Image (spheres, grey):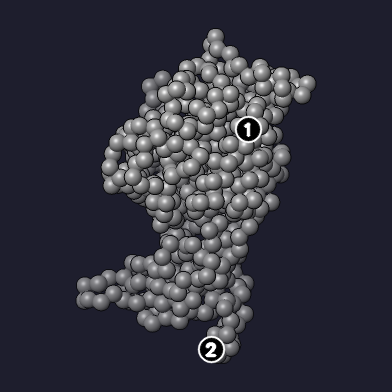
């Protein structure tokens, strides 16, 4: 299955200096020597906790960082590497402040590369000139900074856009579209790769696999651009490819099959390269309208299935994606595409499948004057509240980073206060493997030196296979609900230490890269 359940954590023996250590569950009555031989001690009966919907234990909270046209990062082309790094860190810090746990960074805007590549030229959005070496490879830095903050890094690719211009002669020497003009179709003043050509699918797959094999990414992400969005008076001329590869199908069905074939091919290649890397897509928010298909949504907007040949239902049914992330950029009560209606429709689509569902939130729309709903500071937070009413919705991703920094109408802070007051672990995906690492050992609490020092420093020996650690503070009532929700989760840290600013009982667990959780070590901090 591709859904996960919080693991019931248990306690392990902790050796402390200025704090008292506790063992609970079977083994608590054994001699110290007998207990020390165990790496972890199974949990005993714990009073049942009713899950608090305000603090979900596992939830994706993501941010899209667009590089195309310098939309989010870098803010403009030609900045120094130091300035580029500083801008990126500012975005991540703003996201971390709101307890976000994932970023989706656009690394291939238009058959170009935000990283060192032998397959495609450097993107123009780093230096201002396509193909120009920026003097550094940003990718390791981008990934490392995300991981330092406990965030997943999803590499975002646009699969078919070849160039924002239509003249191949203006592309850098060695650009795939310049070397293979027969792969391309001119449409709406831009250049696209022809989805109907096997060579195109193979190239896109090779580009994705190259990134997965060379960089420590956590996911591969496609956006909503497949066949280009319709433009009045324009025809996407793939007639030669259709004549050669159509195999007797109708044009629309053939085009959808082309996209479905690429999706399945990339899914297989990503997981064959690194099984733990996730693959998902953020489709346009309307699959089909009821007027097109009785099983479609009760909406009246553009249909991704009919207009850009993106059949998200087929990906869900075939399991060729780990998640879908539909872009629901309309507010509640919208006449053509009501948010409530679409959230419910997508939740129903993934029900009973292994495919996880996250929602793409239209943060960029907040404050827009063309729709009264977006002038209300609480609209975005209310939409996230709608998501909570559907157990199939496992989180949100916001478009986009510059709007997170701008915090229009204070909407981001409203969302964080209402829904992200506590950190959250990532939803588990069983098909992606992984296992709970060994619990932390040697957990101790020490007082900092100095008469004015306040608080205690929790520290422990790193666990093999752990990429992060969850720290919980059990309330004075003593009721341990850390296996139920995140009400007691105070931090997810990537180093084996945590500054405890108040006395009480703390739990520490180890997390692998997919955030399977170990049994817990319990430690009491006194005299803060």
Disc 1 marks which residue?
199
In screen coordinates, is 299 left or right of 158? right
Disc assigned to residue 523: none
Q: Position of residue 158 (x, y in %)?
A: 52, 34
| Residue 501 to residue 206: above or below | below
Badge 2: few (under 14), some or many (20 or more) residues near its Cα, within 10 Å?
few
Where disc 1 sits, the SS reads: helix
Figure quadrant of residue 234: top right
Frontmost residue, 249 versus 314? 249
Q: Position of residue 135 (x, y in %)?
A: 33, 45
Figure quadrant of residue 346: top right
Residue in the picture at 60% in, 32% down: 200
Residue in the picture at 54% in, 76% down: 12
Q: Position of residue 336 (x, y in %)?
A: 56, 20
Q: Quadrant of the C terminus?
A: bottom left
Frontmost residue, 1 versus 72? 72
Where disc 2 sits, the SS reads: helix
Q: Position of residue 342 (x, y in %)?
A: 59, 31
Q: In 3D space, how far apart are the residues under numbered discs 2 and 1 (Cα atoms)?
A: 65 Å
| Residue 176 to residue 205: above or below | above
Q: Residue furthest left?
A: 451
Disc 2 marks which residue?
32
Figure quadrant of residue 512: bottom right
Residue in the picture at 21% in, 72% down: 452
In screen coordinates, is 97 left or right of 57? left
């Amino acid at each position: 299955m591709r859904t996960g359940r919080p693991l019931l954590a248990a306690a392990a023996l902790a050796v402390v200096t200025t704090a008292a250590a506790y063992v609970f569950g079977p083994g608590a009555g054994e001699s110290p020597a007998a207990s020390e031989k165990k790496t972890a001690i199974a949990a005993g009966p714990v009073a049942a906790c009713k899950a608090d919907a305000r603090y979900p234990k596992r939830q994706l909270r993501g941010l899209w960082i667009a590089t195309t046209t310098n939309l989010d990062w870098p803010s403009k082309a030609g900045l120094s590497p130091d300035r580029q790094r500083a801008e990126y860190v500012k975005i991540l810090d703003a996201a971390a402040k709101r307890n976000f746990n994932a970023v989706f960074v656009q690394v291939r805007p238009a058959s170009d590369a935000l990283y060192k590549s032998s397959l495609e030229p450097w993107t123009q959005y780093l230096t201002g000139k396509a193909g120009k070496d920026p003097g550094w490879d940003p990718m390791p830095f981008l990934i490392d900074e995300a991981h330092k903050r406990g965030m997943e890094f999803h590499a975002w690719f646009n699969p078919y856009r070849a160039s924002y211009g239509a003249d191949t002669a203006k592309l850098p020497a060695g650009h795939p579209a310049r070397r293979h003009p027969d792969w391309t179709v001119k449409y709406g003043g831009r250049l696209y790769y022809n989805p109907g050509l096997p060579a195109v699918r193979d190239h896109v797959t090779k580009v994705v696999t190259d990134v997965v094999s060379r960089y420590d990414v956590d996911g591969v992400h496609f956006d909503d651009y497949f066949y280009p969005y319709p433009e009045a008076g324009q025809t996407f001329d793939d007639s030669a490819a259709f004549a050669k590869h159509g195999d007797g199908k109708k044009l629309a069905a053939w085009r959808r099959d082309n996209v479905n074939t690429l999706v399945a091919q990339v899914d297989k290649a990503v997981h064959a390269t690194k099984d733990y890397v996730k693959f998902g897509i953020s489709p346009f928010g309307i699959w089909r309208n009821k007027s097109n298909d009785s099983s479609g949504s009760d909406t009246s907007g553009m249909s991704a299935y009919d207009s850009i040949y993106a059949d998200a239902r087929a990906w869900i049914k075939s399991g060729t994606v780990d998640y879908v992330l539909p872009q629901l950029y309309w507010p509640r009560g919208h006449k053509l595409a009501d948010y409530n209606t679409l959230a419910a429709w997508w939740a129903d689509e993934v029900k009973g499948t292994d495919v996880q569902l996250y929602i793409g939130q239209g943060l960029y729309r907040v404050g827009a004057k063309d729709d009264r709903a977006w002038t209300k500071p609480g609209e975005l937070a209310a939409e996230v509240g709608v998501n909570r009413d559907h157990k199939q919705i496992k989180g949100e991703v916001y478009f986009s980073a510059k709007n997170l920094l701008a915090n229009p109408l204070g909407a981001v802070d409203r969302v964080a206060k209402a829904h992200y007051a506590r950190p959250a672990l990532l939803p588990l995906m069983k098909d992606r493997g992984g296992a709970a690492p060994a619990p932390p050992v040697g957990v101790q609490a020490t007082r900092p030196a100095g008469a004015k020092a306040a608080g205690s420093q929790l520290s422990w020996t790193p666990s093999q296979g752990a990429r992060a650690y969850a720290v919980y503070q059990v309330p004075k009532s003593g009721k341990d609900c850390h296996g139920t929700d995140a009400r007691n989760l105070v931090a997810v840290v990537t180093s084996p230490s945590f500054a405890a600013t108040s006395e009480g009982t703390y739990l520490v667990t180890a997390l692998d890269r997919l955030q399977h959780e170990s049994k817990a070590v319990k430690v009491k901090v006194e005299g803060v």
